[in-house]
Image (spheres, rainbow, N blue to C red):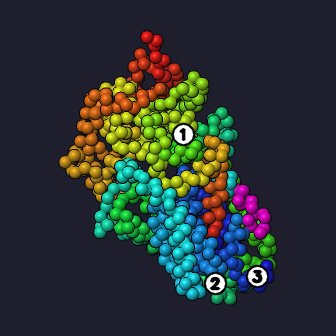
Amino acid sequence: MSFGLPKSYARIGSLLTASGLTVQAVNWCASKSLIPPVQLLYWGERLPRPEVSEIPLLLTTALSCALILFVDAREGRWVWITWGASLAWLVQGDIHGAAGIGLFSGPALLVAALRVNGWRAGALRISLAFGALIVFLLPFFIQNLATPFEVTRRWGAFPLSRLHPPSQLEAEWPRVLQALALAWVAFAVRKTFERSSLMRAPWPKAASGALGQVLLLTGLGLAAWVMMPAFVIVTGQGLQLYHFPDRFSRFIAYVILIALLLISEVLLRAIFSWTRSLVRPRSRETLPLIVGVVCSCYVINARAAEHTVSYGPPREGFPGTGAYKKDFIELTRLLLSKDFAHAKVLGTFDHATMLWWVGFKPGFLLAPDPFLTSRPDAELEERFVALAKEVHISKGHFESIVKSYTSHIFYLSGAKYNTSPLYKIQPDSDYTAQQLSAIKSDYLLTGFSIQVPHSVVESLTKLYEGPREHWDHYKMPDVIVTNRHDQVYGHSPDPRVYERRLQNSTFDLWSKRAPQPQ
Amino acid sequence: MSLASLSAPETFLQLARDIVWPRKRLWLLLHFTALLLGLDYWLSSFWFEPDTPFDLLALYRPEGDTQYVAIVSNLARGQFGESALYESFGTGVEAFPLGSMALHVLCVAILGPAGHMLADGIAAVFYYLSSLSFS
């Protein structure tokens, strides 16, 4: 309601946006050539972004607008403090979005402070806002101080020149222009109709003027446009830069949404004004309510069917469905039984089993997903080699799997060996001509384009051939799980050490034999 | 609706209150609809796959990247340090920022794996409310 839309209207707009129907409706209009193609992106169910992080993103923006547009928000103190807390929440949930919102709401806060009566009062409120921001960011500071660089490098952090930040300013400019033009059209339409004799009903006096609305939308669009270079200039780092185009799309989508709502509000107000005698005031509120609920129920029903779609075998980051899921349930129920109560450490190349074991058994891993641990790279490599040895992978097979995307992303190094035209971890001489060609032609902001240097393959192979003492100090698995879709299927642990306890159409489960009495 | 009410702008506090707890109670129906939007994965799973336990339902949440589910479970058990490795269990500090996982961590700490369902519902209602305050 920061933009002064009528409440019933804003409520329906918000619900339809949450349900995804706004996107579907606009896409349908674009497919019928009723409007130019528009790329809209709002909320989703992915945890934690955007399902949760989108809440502080919108809240911080709304509070920034409210501080400028509402006297009571500006004069009180709690809105300033809530702004600081909300931005701190956003930084710790979506740092890419926070870069854009920071660019937008920093100047907005200064404008709001200047509109407070008395410079002392303004300075006090700014201090409260930034004080709250710092206090609520303390956990983030502590985590950063305690986290080694190797860990953030596995998440995809790499150094970049502050003087030459990457940008997509030219590529994104048409979409910025499109959104801002729409916002200014909304402004013109409203000003035209406000003064028109066609409007028989008086225009409500909103706290936000039409000019204030359009200036805020312009600020949001421009912040979206420059947030990626601004982030690199401030931090001197790249961190999964492909998120920036995604956030850009969201910001622009919100500008378009508000502009469309403002335009359609004017048109609906005009229609209601002409048909005042036909449509009772009560119906004007009840009708949108019914429309909102009915449309959302349709979405709930449609998504219910979508959730049950069977994808088959596991994909990257997604557990398998169908027969895999049935077998997975059998496996996990067995692992929860008292027969496996003693089992502490699991060795597996099945990603879903690994995550289930850590999250719900709960137990430990011999070779964890790099995202689950803060241990050094060298330890992850030793653990990976230890697991490969434990399931008797041949040297040739080992050399092939240490070059694979899956091994690095889910077991060895995360995004450490991501390459792009912007950065690669090793000099050119450490890559093949084919790899260098692929890197050169790759997407500028790619985050998981893994090219493993020669030297890394060689050192891992050397570790594999080396003495056991490198990894012998790790507790070896009590249970080992393989599945027929993983990259080591067909290999199995030493039957003198492990006995097979389960074999279904997907999984093989081995448990360590009890030590024989001497 | 009188002309006087049309010409008097509401304060932000009044608007904020009306967003969270509408003066016309009928509008609470939209809060409930938003809740259903957040729960649709769970409700459809109960209907179509009644035998799938909560822990696996949590792991199969829509849109993948299931590592977060494991991290949420560990944080909900109070494990803010290393939790995946036997030798270094409890050492160090969880590196990934906690902000956007806090809601799920809290709900899972209270309800176990079923807390994911509660958190998804709350997140959907909060998204609706924050989107409303934005627009």
Type of secondary structure dominating the magenta stretch: helix
Dots 2 and 1 on the same chain: yes
Q: Secondary structure at mark 1?
A: helix
Whether residue A16 is visible, yes or no, is no
Q: Write down the quadrant of residue B58 in the picture.
A: top right
The residue type indicated by label 3 comes to Ser
Query: A425 or A117: which is nearer to us?
Result: A117
Mark linked to residue A193: 2
* Residue A331 visible in this rendered orientation of the protein: yes
B32 part of magenta stretch: yes
The answer to whether residue A196 is above or below residue A43 is below
- For the residues carrying marks 3 and 1, which lies nearer the camera in this image? 1
Residue beneath the point at 37% across and 39% down: A380
Alpha carbon separation for disc pair 3 and 1: 55 Å
Question: What percent of the width, then of the height, locates residue A35?
Answer: 53, 68
Q: Which region shows up in magenta?
A: B21-33
From the viewer's perspective, is residue B109 above or below residue A173? above
> Viewer-nearest of labels 2 and 1?
1
- Residue A501 placement (x, y as % from top left): 52, 20
Q: Is residue B25 magenta?
A: yes
Q: Which residue is mark 3?
A: B5
Q: Identify the subunit bearing mark 3.
A: B
Amino acid type of the residue that numbered disc 1 sits on in the rendered structure: Gly
| Residue corresponding to mark 1 | A359
